[in-house]
Image (cartoon, grey):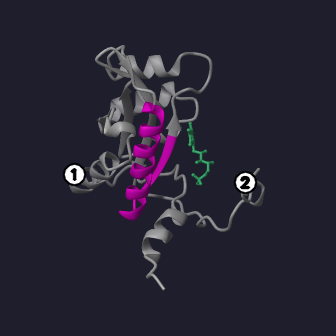
């Protein structure tokens, strides 16, 4: 039998959205670097790597982001945010899979944060009808032609949650739907 890397499986199952962070405990640069390396290791259509990451650790910017985001109040306590942005075209040609690429990068951010003992939560940028993405982009000086896909709020966790368990039976289809 092939050997199972149970630690890797447990890391996936134990990743939960953490929304309470220890404001007073910073995340060290070495951890930030590991998380970024994992983000850049995500699969990417045509290997285009369209992603860009804006690392925000200035308290006043995190607070402004929290003010803008209707479901992002935890950014006020997070040690940092990784804002996942993307090119959507290159040399005049649309990059069809930038959202998938960035989602894979985001998932790697959350999983690597969990492996480091950090808490994190994915914040979408399409919430509400008030151009949240546009407002966040202008706050962070993201160029017009770059999309802002989502935000990972990251910090030392002040809450614990049970790991995921089991398979959603309604999601499962055998051979054909
Ligand atoms: C695209 C996307 C957008 C999300 N946006 C938010 C958000 O704005 N605020 C928030 O607190 N959680 C957000 N979440 C986290 C989900 O609420 C969370 O993943 C879900 O409740 C399942 O919980 P778990 O991550 O602990 O398994 C988002 C997740 C995804 C995938």
Q: Is residue 137 above or below residue 55?
A: above
Residue farthest bottom in this picture: 1
Q: Position of residue 66 (x, y in %)?
A: 47, 32
Q: Is residue 23 magenta?
A: no
Is disc 1 placed on a helix, strand or loop? helix
Is the residue marked by circle 1 packed among few (<14), some (14-19), or many (20+) residues within 10 Å? few
Q: Position of residue 148 (x, y in %)?
A: 42, 27
Main secondary structure found in the magenta portion: helix
Please name the residue shown 46% across and 17% down the image.
Answer: 134
Disc 2 marks which residue?
Answer: 171
Please name the residue shown 39% across and 49% down the image.
Answer: 23
Disc 1 marks which residue?
Answer: 29
Is the residue marked by circle 2 packed among few (<14), some (14-19), or many (20+) residues within 10 Å? few
Please name the residue shown 33% across and 36% down the image.
Answer: 59
Query: Is residue 131 left or right of 5 when viewed as pictured?
Result: right
Q: How many marks?
A: 2
Pick whichever, 86 or 67, lies toward us. 86
Q: Is residue 76 visible?
A: no
Residue farthest front in this picture: 175
Is disc 2 placed on a helix, strand or loop? helix
Please name the residue shown 78% across and 55% down the image.
Answer: 170
Q: Is residue 104 magenta?
A: yes
- How far apart are the alpha carbons under marks 2 and 1? 39 Å
Q: Is residue 117 above or below residue 58?
A: below
Q: Which mark is residue 151?
A: none
Residue farthest left in this picture: 30
Q: Is residue 117 visible?
A: yes
Which comes before the other along the chain, label 2 or label 1? 1
- Magenta residues (range): 97-122
């Amino acid at each position: 039998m092939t050997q199972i890397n149970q630690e890797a499986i447990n890391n996936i199952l134990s990743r939960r959205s953490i929304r309470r962070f220890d404001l007073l405990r910073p995340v060290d640069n070495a951890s930030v670097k590991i998380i970024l390396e994992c983000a850049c290791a995500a699969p990417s259509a045509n290997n285009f790597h369209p992603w860009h990451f804006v690392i925000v650790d200035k308290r006043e910017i995190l607070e402004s982001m929290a003010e803008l985001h209707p479901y992002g109040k935890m950014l006020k306590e997070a040690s940092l945010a990784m804002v996942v942005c993307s090119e959507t075209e290159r040399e005049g040609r649309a990059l069809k899979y930038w959202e998938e690429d960035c989602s894979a990068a985001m998932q790697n951010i959350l999983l690597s944060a969990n492996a480091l003992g950090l808490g994190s939560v994915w914040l979408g940028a399409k919430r509400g009808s008030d151009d949240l993405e546009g407002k966040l982009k202008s706050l962070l000086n993201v160029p017009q032609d770059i999309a802002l896909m989502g935000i990972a709020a990251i910090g030392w966790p002040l809450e614990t949650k049970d790991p995921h368990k089991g398979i959603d039976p309604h999601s499962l289809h055998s051979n054909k739907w």
